[in-house]
Amino acid sequence: MDFKELASSYKKELFGSVLPFWLDNSLDMEDGGYFTCLDQKGKVFDSDKFIWLQARQVWLFSMLYNKVEKKQEWLDCAIHGAKFLASNGHDGNYNWYFSLNKEGKPLIEPYNIFSYTFATMAFGQLYKATGNEEYAHVAKSTWEVILAKSSNPKGKWSKAHAGTRELKDFALPMILCNLALEIEFLLEPTVLHETIEKCIYEVMNVFYRPELGIVVENVTKDGQLSDSFEGRLVNPGHAIEAMWFIMDLGVRLNRPELVQKANEVALKMINYGWDEQYGGIVYFKDRLGYPPQQLEHDQKLWWVHLEALITTLKGYKLTGSEESLEWFKKLHKYTWDRFPDTANGEWFGYLNRQGEVLLPLKGGKWKGCFHVPRGLYQCWQLLEELSQDK
């Protein structure tokens, strides 16, 4: 495998196709922030603004400015979104709404903790780019709110009736693994250490079930399996993404055994989620083999495959696992044959089980300027490093 050539293809796709698509089409120059509901050619089909997608785009362009090149266009794009978020995105106490209308008026209340986590990431990365203390204040203040809400993330907006089937989900400890490293420079060492250790324990010892060989999405409050729709739910892409976060923590903490275990779990989850008939990784499964309640369970999604590319490549680089490299090759072919839109730029997000484009949109309520460019950036960097190792 020619790592140098592959690195060039990921880099070219990032800078030649994906970033121009968002820079040309997503900025709302009238009211601020970004449009994320973009059709195949980049035309806006809905003007609602979703906080986590706004924040992810701020983070993405700030990160590129910090790590790739001090390009003014990227910094301007990030600040453009951050101003809109700081003015409109929260209730004044850093409770971040889920969505706003075009002008910035709240549409959906702050029920979703991931509005908070991505706002923290965004303002932390932008602070690193600018040195503006106001951005640091937003990031640290929101982080404090996240910690306060972590035991009951939805708070008064939870639909669950208290006391009957109280579950906790994998998504929060998983994202905090990544977020803690993202804003390490803003945190007290003790807080950082406690957060990281707690998240590693939750991900690798509570949600990863060695007796099943898989990661589950929900467990009871005391860490037991639940025989219910939510308790049987498995999201292979989520688990695979979490494993590269854990690998990063293993490197940061100099714990090679943690990196090794994360790679092994990732390989189990890829094998578990892979569709032997049509290829690709399915969105959801029921761990007991019952019909999942999610009607989209057998779709093939952009983010799942990009995260699997990062994870297998990182696993190979850090552990030398030939199985990881073979999966990367298989995933690379599947992904690049189906998701990129060579005619209009950017990538499709949603394929049916057979691997055909199901929705031609490039962005919407759930897909924005994040997984595609982050995945391309991560793989480009890893491939460059591998090419220099050889």
Image: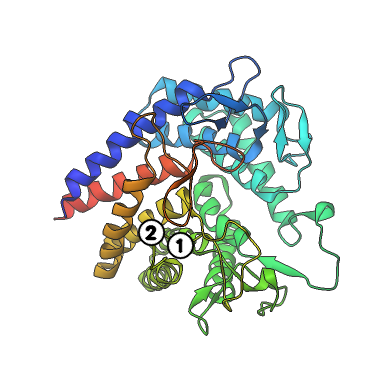
Q: Quick one: 260 or 17, which is closer to the camera?
A: 17
Q: Quick one: 359 or 99, which is closer to the camera?
A: 359
Pointer 2 with pointer 1, Cβ within 8 A? yes
Around disc 2, counting alpha carbons within 10 Å, would you say few (fewer than 14), some (14 to 19), or many (20 or more)?
A: many
First reached walking from the N terminus: tag 2 or tag 1: 1
Q: Looking at the image, which residue sits at the far bottom?
A: 211
Residue visible at 28% across and 34% down in the picture? 12
Look at the picture and state if 42 lies above or below 151: above
Residue visible at 21% across and 53% down in the picture? 386
Residue visible at 39% across and 44% down in the picture? 339
**What's under tag 1, amino acid-wise?**
Ile
Distance from disc 2 to disc 1, alpha carbons, whole Å, reads 7 Å
Look at the picture and state if 126 lies above or below 113: above
Look at the picture and state if 269 lies above or below 362: below
x and y, in percent, of residue 75 in the image: 47, 25
The residue beneath circle 2 is 311
x and y, in percent, of residue 192 in the image: 56, 57
x and y, in percent, of residue 80 in the image: 56, 22
What label sits on residue 240 in the rendered view? 1
